[in-house]
Amino acid sequence: DFTFPSVDLAPGACCLVVKDVAAFEARYGPGLPVVGQYLGSLANDGERITLVDPLGAAIQSVKYEDNWYDSTDGRGYSLVSADPAGTDLESWSQKNAWRPSDREGGSPGKMD
């Protein structure tokens, strides 16, 4: 669970929601656009993530699967959008909308 604070993002900009800010900064360094810390845990074997508006209506819902790519299954690469601007919103829960990150550990706060 996470409630976004008031945040203005420029078109194409990123913000980060992390499990543990101190652990995240120890790994990736300070100064990245972290907007907060979520409660709970994300399942490594797949899960549905839903972004809702203040009234509780779903804005977007995405389901990811653990077995989509070998390199993202415990090998340090994250799932990233294959084409953030060109992917139809209805396709975000399908394997072909995602790819492994270019770098081990991903590239938090930047487009990969």
Image (cartoon, rainbow, N blue to C red):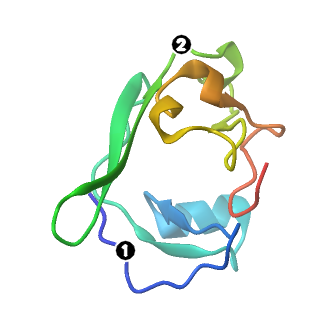
Q: Does residue 73 show up?
A: no
Sort mark 2 into few (<14), some (14-19) or many (20+) by Cα contacts within 10 Å.
few
Task: Indicate the amino acid at tag 1.
Answer: Phe
Secondary structure, mark 1, is: loop
Secondary structure, mark 2, is: loop
Left or right, residue 30 beside residue 56: right
Residue at the spot 65% in from the left edge and 37% down from the top edge: 78
Task: Indicate the amino acid at tag 2.
Answer: Asn
For label 2, the residue is 67
Q: Position of residue 20 (x, y in %)?
A: 45, 62
Residue at the spot 31% in from the left edge and 64% down from the top edge: 2
Judge by depth and name the residue closer to the eye, 54 or 75: 54
Q: From the viewer's perspective, is residue 66 above or below residue 22?
A: above
Q: CB atoms at circles 1 and 2 under 8 Å apart?
A: no
Q: Position of residue 10 (x, y in %)?
A: 66, 79
Judge by depth and name the residue closer to the eye, 84 or 27: 84
Could you tell me how far apart the alpha carbons at marks 1 and 2 are, in whole angstroms? 29 Å
Give the quarter of the figure containing the N terminus.
bottom left
Outermost residue toward the right?
Answer: 102
Left or right, residue 89 beside residue 52: right
* First in sequence: mark 1 vs mark 2: 1
Residue at the spot 56% in from the left edge and 38% down from the top edge: 88
Q: Which mark is residue 4?
A: 1
Left or right, residue 35 beside residue 74: left
Q: Which mark is residue 96?
A: none
Q: Does residue 107 show up?
A: yes
Outermost residue toward the left?
Answer: 55
Q: From the viewer's perspective, is residue 36 above or below residue 1?
A: below
Q: Position of residue 104 (x, y in %)?
A: 78, 37
Q: Based on the displayed image, in which of its 4 quarters is residue 33 positioned?
A: bottom right
